[in-house]
Image (spheres, rainbow, N blue to C red):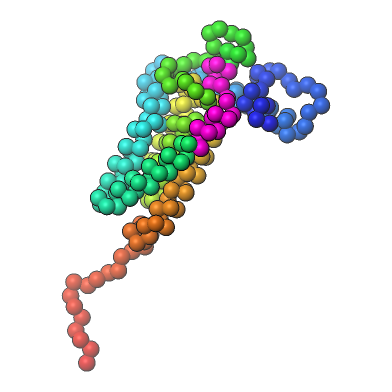
Amino acid sequence: IFNALFKPPFLKRKICGNVSLELKLVNLFSQLDQRLFLLINRWANARWDTVFVELSALGAWPIGIVALAALAHVGRRLFWRHALVLLLGLLIISAAGNAIKSNVERARPSRFFMQETMHNPSPVRIADPWSLKGNSFPSGHSLTAFYFMTYLSLYRAAYAWWALPLAGLIAFARVYVGHHFPSDCLAGAALGAAGAWLAWTLFKRVFARETQNLTGGQPPCISPHPLPPDH
């Protein structure tokens, strides 16, 4: 199934012979994935290149700076505890993503289409020529973006309205600039969100006292005027 999904026939080729329904569905999904990539990549316009190239770059380490900046108000001790948990979770989830990349070995869109169509150069439009090394699945930038932004959304629901759309734009930008198929970004987003949930769960369990009021609990109300003693 991995070979059928990540090293499939090109768009208009049909699977021949007696094959299972699962492989037919996988091939259909692969074709839809390729068509969606080409639709987004060919829609790209030079006027938007700078915006999406910057969004794409934001999905590397700068998105972590955004997350830490959003947590800066919590106080020094709690801030460093958030940072420690985020770093630990990022190391684990990044290692998992890299392990999947090494085992799946899916080619980047430019290399994939060049191999499949025998066109040289590739028909893929590359808006950003940097960071094209390595395999394609899953998208590391999408993983990182959804990891940090999902963590922020779990920490405080009010952040979700801007954090999750920002992560989605970063994932879209990775397709726009020609670096990833949509399924690469969906997989990266799922891994990142799962990692964020695990990191937030770990934070709550390890630092329970500091988080008892973060998700809706209110501190006790203390009156500034002492009550008269009972008689």
- Decide if residue 151 is in sight here: yes
Q: Looking at the picture, how far across and down is residue 228, in whole percent?
A: 19, 84
Tell me the chief SS of the magenta region.
Answer: helix
Hey, which residue is sitting farthest bottom in the picture? 231
Say if 148 sits above or below 178 in the image.
Answer: below
Q: Is 57 or 172 nearer to us in this picture?
A: 57
User: Which quarter of the picture shows residue 166?
Assistant: top left
What residue lies at 20% left-to-right and 86% top-to-bottom?
A: 229
Say if 156 sits above or below 49 in the image.
Answer: below
What residue lies at 58% left-to-right and 18% top-to-bottom?
A: 112
* Residue 98 on the magenta span: yes
- Decide if residue 158 is in sight here: no
User: Which part of the image, by quadrant, shows the C terminus?
Assistant: bottom left
Left or right: residue 168 versus residue 219 is right
Q: Which residues are magenta?
A: 96-112
Left or right: residue 17 versus residue 201 is right
* Residue 105 on the magenta span: yes
User: Which quarter of the picture shows residue 63?
Assistant: top left
Q: Looking at the picture, how far across and down is residue 114, in whole percent?
A: 58, 13
What residue lies at 22% left-to-right and 72% top-to-bottom?
A: 223
What residue lies at 73% left-to-right and 34% top-to-bottom?
A: 22
Q: Looking at the picture, how far across and down is residue 203, in whole percent?
A: 40, 53
Say if 72 sits above or below 168 in the image.
Answer: below
Say if 150 sits above or below 57 in the image.
Answer: below
Q: Looking at the picture, how far across and down is residue 39, in whole percent?
A: 55, 21
Hey, which residue is sitting farthest right in the picture? 18
User: Which quarter of the picture shows residue 170?
Assistant: top left
